[in-house]
Amino acid sequence: MVTLLVAYAFFLLVVAVVLGTLSVYAWGRRDYTGGTALAVLLAGLSIWDLCVAVGVLTRGTDMALLFAYGLYVGVMPAIAGLFVFSLAYTNRDRYLNRWTYALLSVEPIVFFTALLAGPDGLIYTVSGPTGTGIYGWEIAGGPVFWGHLVYAYALIAVSSALIVHYALDSGDLYAKQVYAVLLAIALPWFGSVLSIFGDTSIELTPVLLAGTGVTLSWAFFRGRLLDISPVAHREVVESLNSAVFVVDTNDRILEANDTGRQLLGDDTLVGQSVTAALETSPDLLEKYRGLNDDTEETQAVIERTARFFDIQLTPLYDSRDTLVGRVFLVHEITEQKQRERELERRNQQLDQFAAVLSHDLRNPLNVASGRLALARERNDPEEFDRVEKAHERMSNLIDEVLAFARDEKTTDRVEIRLSALAKAAWGHVDTGEATLQIDGDREIIGDRDQLLQLFENVVRNSVEHGSTGGRPGADDNVGRDDAGVTIRVDATPEGFTISDNGPGVPPEKREEIFTHGVTSSESGTGLGLAIVQHVIESHGWDVEMTESRSGGAKLVVSGLSAESAQPSEMAS
């Protein structure tokens, strides 16, 4: 029996040293969540084992009784440290204030007051010495002892419940370290129950503290108990707008935040393989497989149904630089991409603005230059009036081209006759020997300046591309003169047409002719018909390029409200 007790005492001394070493380790990491409380808990358990060991080695003496009472110097901070650790570890540190610490100090103060100043029997009733009992004395618990026991078990139960609840809610990523803490708590208190209420020759609680030391050692050095805070992880990851998935080295999802579960439409992602979880998102799965996660963070961008996502896969290493998993992050960047595209579109519009401005100002500038030369030659006031009108037209064009560059829709709608519109545009263009024929008339409701811009560009386009490229022997129904092209304006129930007897547009090019920059002339800008299309679309109409009766170009504008047509008239 004596030999067994001696072995028992030396075993407890070893456990006390291990627990003390872990306490020092935890104290060195007291800045981490729960580090200080855990250091106090381990220090208390170490003192507990140390007192029991010395009490056994000095059994039957007064010193043995001293250490039998002295073990509470370790028990009291151990219980309080466990409770404080459970609050900090489970993100309830808001309750850790001076009132909490004051309440935790009440029971130790009462206990040690009873021990030092109270009558015998309040804590223990002692008889002996005797050959039985590990301390060589018969020791029976008094009322303060039983009160302390109820208080201790209640505090341990609350602490355990907090950690169990957190374990169920924390997911798989921190399951190992949480369960390690639970095992470390359960072992000594299970031994305590057996020792007090069972029939054992030695106290099992100090022995099972060895299991506590081994479990916490694993939790510290392999489970990274104080290196990774599950509280901090949860607060940071769940607050992100990005989808976050933590994947182990076997491509199994250990953790996913709410955004990630919403993205994939699955609340049961944890525990699934990446292949199974991303089965409904093959584009994400392809990027995941394609990213290289061996040495550095990798990144890619994908587009899904008009939504853009930035994909990042970051290796996750432990303190020994061993790859333990990956962090797979999916961040939506749709708004950023939309802004980039809008900026590109605006830049293109600025380029078009400069080109359109130089293109459309050439018509009134040519007219003004020609009229100014005539005015100087003839000294005719009417020619000066025409120069002034050309300058006014240039001013209006600048306003209209600005609106075109901003992609503004027409708002200033008035009623205007088709014939008046064609004649006004004809006067703004240097038409040379070309002639204008108007067949039929109708009311058009639209923006007068923009419609003038439309007709000017069509007329100018026909003059430049048709005057020198007519078809020999072409049908003369539109009154073509050998010196120039004839441009014909027709009213239709759906809208109007503008045609000429020039070379026309090949069928394969009729759709692309409205595209900005497309031209059949080496000196052309490719802007004229692009401006025409913009004006027509801003009015909500439709446009089509076809072939005229003489084989020339024919612009068909439709989608207007039906108006009555009037007899034709000629203008030149």
Image: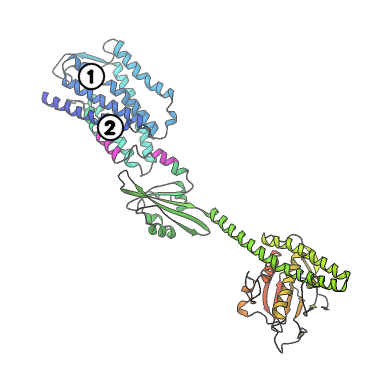
User: Does 228 lie within the magenta span?
Assistant: yes
Q: Amino acid at mark 2?
A: Leu
Point out residue 379 in the picture as x, y percentages from the top left corner: 88, 71
Quarter of the image where the N terminus is located = top left
Q: Main secondary structure of the magenta part?
A: helix
Disc 1, SS: helix
Residue range highlighted in magenta: 212-235
- Of residue 14 and residue 4, the one placed in the foreground of this image is 14
Task: Relative to 481, say whether 410 is above or below.
Answer: above
Instruction: Look at label 1 and name its amino acid.
Output: Ala
Indicate the quadrant where residue 419 lies.
bottom right
Identify the residue shown where x is 52% and y is 57%.
307
Let me know if residue 540 appears in the view: no
Q: Residue 323, labelled with which disc? A: none
The percent position of residue 19, horizontal first and vertical second, equals 26, 30
Image coords of residue 37 (percent x, y) = 35, 29
Tell me where residue 383 appears, x and y as whole percent. 85, 70
